[in-house]
Image (cartoon, rainbow, N blue to C red):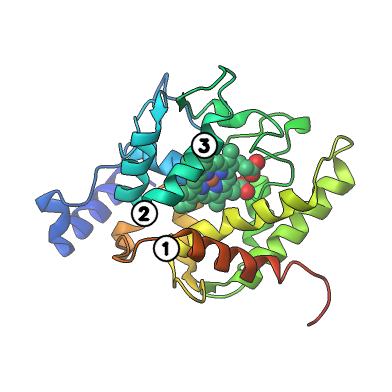
Amino acid sequence: MKLVSFLATFVAITSARPEYASGSIPAWHPAGPGDLRSPCPGLNIAANYGFFPHDGKNITEDIVIKGLGDAYNVDPELSKILFKSGAATNPEPNATWFSLAHLRRHNLIEHDASLTRADAYTGNNWKFNPQKYAMTRQYWTEAMVKPIHMANARIQADVNSKAFNPEYNFTSERQLQAAAEPAAPLLVLGDRKTGYTDRRFVEMFFEQEKLPYELGWRKKEDVLTMDDLTAMTNLIADKISLFSE
Ligand code: HEM
C-alpha cells in the first residue's frame, strides 16, 4: 500500500473508531530485527501485540496464561496444557520456558502439511509461505470461512505433501492436531458453535498476523475452553474425508 493511501486509511479508521484514540486497542508491531517468530500464527500475533514478549523469547507459563487470556480469552487451564507442549520444544531438560524459535523444531509440534508454511524438507518450515497459503485460501469459497473449508484445505495440504515430500511424516495423532490448529482461529474470530467466520478476519489473521480490530472484531467475552477446542476440532476432523456425506 502506498504511504498516502495508508495514511488515508489510518485517518479514516481512527476517526471512525474512537477506541483507537483512547488506546484501548493494543498497538501492533510486526517482528523487527532480532525478534523471534514461529510457525504458529496465533502466538506470533500475541507477540506482535505485546501480549507475549515482543522479541519472542523467555515465554513462561505465567506469560502464556496472561497473554492468551488478554489476546483471545483462553481459559487458564487450557493455556497451561498448551504451555506444556510449548515448553517441551525447549531442548533444556524440564524447561520452564520456551521461545518462539523452539517451536520450529521439526516433528515435535511443528509438522509437515501445514496450511501456510512449507515442509521442513523443502526449506523454511516456520515463515508464512505465500504459495502454501494460496493453496489453502482457494478453499475459502464463501464470504464466511466454515469448518468444511478448513477440512478441504487440510485434505489438499496432506495430499500435496504426501505426493511431493519424500520425507513426508504424518500420523493419525497428527491429523487431529492438524484439525485443532485451524479450529483455533475460527473459535477466536468467529462463531463459537458453528465456526462460521468472516473471511476477511481469517485473511488478516494469517496474511498479516494481525487481529481484525479495524474490521470490527473484538475479543469474545466468553472464555475459550478445552471443550470448545475439542468440539470445533471434531467439526473439522469429521469433514476431513473425500466422501460426499
Ligand atoms: C502455547 C500455545 C500454542 C502453541 C505452543 C502453539 C504451537 C504451534 C505450532 C508449533 C504450530 C506449527 C504446526 C505446523 O507445523 O503447522 C502451530 C500451528 C498453528 N497454530 Fe498454534 N500454538 C499455540 C496456540 C495457538 C493459538 C492460541 C492459536 C490461535 C488463536 C493458534 C493457531 C495456530 C494455527 C492456525 C496453526 C496452523 C498454521 C498452519 O497450518 O500453517 N495456535 N501452533
Q: Residue at x 45, y 41 (%)?
A: 43
Query: Picture coordinates of residue 149 (x, y %)?
Result: 64, 69
Q: Residue at x 33, y 66 (%)?
A: 222
Label 2 to label 3: alpha-carbon separation: 18 Å
| Residue at disc 1, CB closer than 8 Å to ligand 1 | no
Asked whether disc 2 touches disc 3, contact meaning CB atoms under 8 Å apart, the reply is: no
Per the model, the C-alpha gap separating discs 3 and 1 is 24 Å
Residue occupying the point 63% across, 64% down = 150
Q: From the top left corner, tell me how far across and down residue 204 is, in percent.
A: 44, 55
Q: Is residue 128 visible?
A: no
Asked which secondary structure carries label 2, the reply is helix
Q: Residue 153 in the image: state x and y as whole percent.
A: 69, 61
Residue wearing tag 1: 189
| Residue at the spot of label 3 | 84
**Picture coordinates of residue 103 (x, y %)?**
57, 31
Q: Quadrant of the C terminus?
A: bottom right
Report the side of 8 relative to 152 (left or right).
left
Q: Secondary structure at mark 3?
A: helix
Pointer 2 residue Cβ closer than 8 Å to ligand 1? yes
Label 2 or label 3, whichever lies nearer to me, is: 3
What amino acid type should be assigned to the residue bearing mark 3? Lys
Up the image or down, 188 lies above or below 97; here it is: below
Q: Is residue 58 above or below residue 25?
A: above
Looking at the image, which residue sits at the far bottom?
245
* Label 2, label 1: how far apart the Cα atoms are: 9 Å
Sooner in the amino-acid sequence: mark 2 or mark 3: 2
* Three-letter residue code for mark 1: Leu
The residue labelled by disc 2 is 72
Most foreground residue, 10 or 34: 34
